Amino acid sequence: MIDMKKNNSDKIKELQKKNQENQRKYTKKREDEEKKANQLVHQMVSKIDANPHDYHHYYDLATLLVEGKDYEQAEELLMKALGIFDQSSEDIKDTLKFGLGNVYYAAQEYDRAIKIFQEINDDKLQAEAYIMLAQSYMAKGDNKRAMVFALSAQSTRQKDPAVNEMIGDNLLALGNFSQAAEFYDLVLTAEPQNGRANFNRGLVAMVADEPFESYFKRANQYDPAYFNKGQKKLKDIEKFIQLNGTKKAHDQHGKKD
């Protein structure tokens, strides 16, 4: 006769052992990543010490600190750099400001990020600043203002799929479905394997009563995480279509009467 208790106990022990091993691997991987990040930070600090008049080193170190979610130190470093390079050319100051704006954006301090990005005038960074302003307003849920800056960025980046997708996302949020479709089509011409754009183009096609299955199929194939996350959006659109259909039927009935 098989001893079921012993059998289950062995399975539990085996599972615990596996979990412990996975935990050890995860901890080791995280420690290795932290060690590597610390080494890179140390290298950048050494570069600043060796050449404190090269603004690139401050920007690069701040970027590393943001990647490590050390926003406070990154902010402190760039504020210090803006003091050091106070008498430098506008493009140097704007580069450091752009870095500072990115720190605030990463830390989800969107109002502070917006204030900094609006101060940037350098031609080479202008489009990037507009993109970050659009993203900051999108993060705040202000799609109308986001659209203004997304379109400003698009004036010099007409074929940039990231910018066109951002415009499509804002138009979708504002309920301008036919216009959103145009921008998603531009994105998919450049990036047919863009799962996000395929999913949102599918939503637009549903509203327009166009074939949409192929878009969702590609979305699920190329970005299953976004596809699964977007199921609430899908339900909201279905609800919108049903309500719209009911309203149309009601209006037509009213006209007949």
Image (spheres, helix red, strand yellow):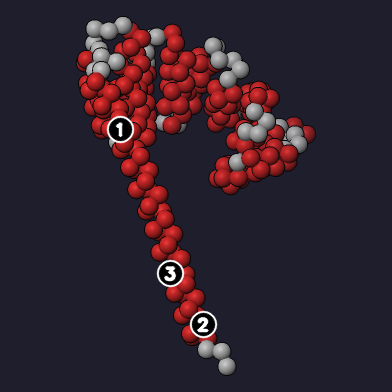
- Say which residue label 3 marks: 16
Residue 216: x, y in percent? Answer: 68, 41
Real-space Cα separation, disc 1 to disc 3, in angstroms: 37 Å
Q: In the structure shown, which secondary structural element does the residue marked by tag 1 occupy? A: helix
Real-space Cα separation, disc 2 to disc 1, in angstroms: 51 Å
From the image, state whether disc 1 or disc 3 is nearer to you: 1
Residue 201: x, y in percent? Answer: 66, 33
Characterize the local packing of mark 1: few (<14), some (14-19) or many (20 or more) Cα atoms within 10 angstroms.
some
- The C terminus - image quarter: top right
Q: In the structure shown, which secondary structural element does the residue marked by tag 2 occupy? A: helix
Name the kind of residue labelled 3 in the image: Gln
Name the kind of residue labelled 1 in the image: Val
Name the kind of residue labelled 2 in the image: Asn
- Say which residue label 2 marks: 7
First in sequence: mark 2 or mark 3? 2
Tell whether 42 sits left or right of 120. left
Residue 38: x, y in percent? Answer: 30, 38
Residue 52: x, y in percent? Answer: 24, 18
- Residue at screen point 50% across, 80% down: 8
- Residue at screen point 31% across, 12% down: 93
Question: Would you place residue 154 above or below residue 17 in this image?
Answer: above
- Say which residue label 1 marks: 41
